[in-house]
Image (cartoon, grey):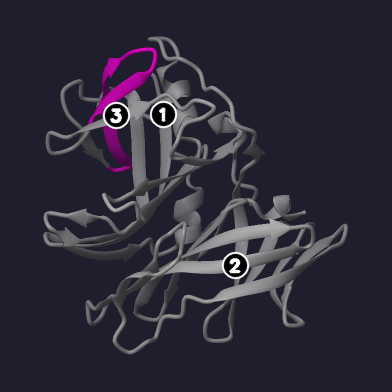
Amino acid sequence: MLDDIYGVWANKDCELIRTSKFSLLFERAGSTISASLKLLNATDNRIVFDTRAIAAFDTTTRQVTVKAKDLLKGERLLIDDDPGNELQLDSRECMVEDTPRNLVVMSRGKAVEALSKDDNELRLAVPGNRWQNLDLIEKIGIAERYDMKTANADNVGICLQEWGLGSGYVADEQGHVRVITIDTNRHSYIFNLMEWKGTGITYCRAGRIRYDNNGTVFAQNIRLMKNPDELTSFMADDNREAAREKIVINDALFNPDACTFARNGIYWSVKSVSAEQITLHGCGGEEYTYDRSQKYSANMLEWFEYRDYEEQRPTR
């Protein structure tokens, strides 16, 4: 019954990606931009929201507060950079009430989510006894596991889009899951707490993405990054409008030897193609490698339905 909420939702100050397993919410409140990742477990008319990690970036003081468990197993804290104990990694069991016009998620007798099916508006309770009203930007469909297409020169764009569809994870050398990725037909998300250059990083972002046979165009509308070389906390002034904006690809901007920074995004051009792997020219001399996902790919958690980019127009 929760299928109606699966997708990308946004307003001026928020963006939410909701799947059958995850809820990743970006919110701007005052001088703080935060990212909150929850693991979902739904059975019949019940759903458990288990908050696995929160990262809060204060744009005024430039302070970054992070609290996180293993993003999948959740057995213990991996990061506790929260001396004031301001961030709560709670677990909440809720009841779901479904009617022809509304879907309501209740916790202890009070609504915490309310979907109006007539106008695709989602009301979401957030910390501080506040509500956010979100519009549907992109609908996603959960799919059964399947073997994705093999690539050739004529279907590179289709394969780039399809091979990334779904949610996945990356674990560190100790087996702790520190990265969750979620890619839809039009958007790309990451919650990343890996180590880099010998120290921990925090990287949470939301972006729009589009592919063709020449490569990929990627445009971030939310970027939260803390690493030894960078501290960024950015959300588009009107995030709803940014999240719903269509990417129009200009093939002349693909550079066969490097990435290109353009007004509408970053262009990553195709370097090589084989049936099972596509390599793109990244930025700064890096290469981005995409492997064909198969039915039993180890690090895949969810599979989404492939839908043509033009068929996924924003609803409002």
Identity, as a three-letter code, of the amino acid under mark 3: Thr
Helix, strand or loop at disc 1?
strand
Using the image as rendered, state which of residue 124 and residue 264 is in the foreground: 124
Residue, x 31% and y 41% (percent of image)? Answer: 265
Q: Is residue 285 magenta?
A: no
Identify whether 104 is placed above or below 84.
above
Q: Name the residue under label 2.
A: 49
Magenta residues? 263-281
Residue 227 visible in the snapshot = yes
Q: Is residue 267 left or right of residue 161?
A: left
Task: Report x, y in % for residue 162.
Answer: 49, 28
- Residue 293 locus on image (x, y percent): 46, 27
Q: Mark 1 points at which residue?
A: 211
Q: How far apart are marks 2 and 1 (CA)?
A: 33 Å
Label 1 to label 3, Cα distance in Å? 14 Å
Could you tell me the amino acid type at mark 2?
Answer: Phe
Q: Which of marks 2 and 1 is in front?
A: 2
Question: Could one spot residue 57 in this view of the protein?
Answer: no
Residue that badge 3 annotates:
289
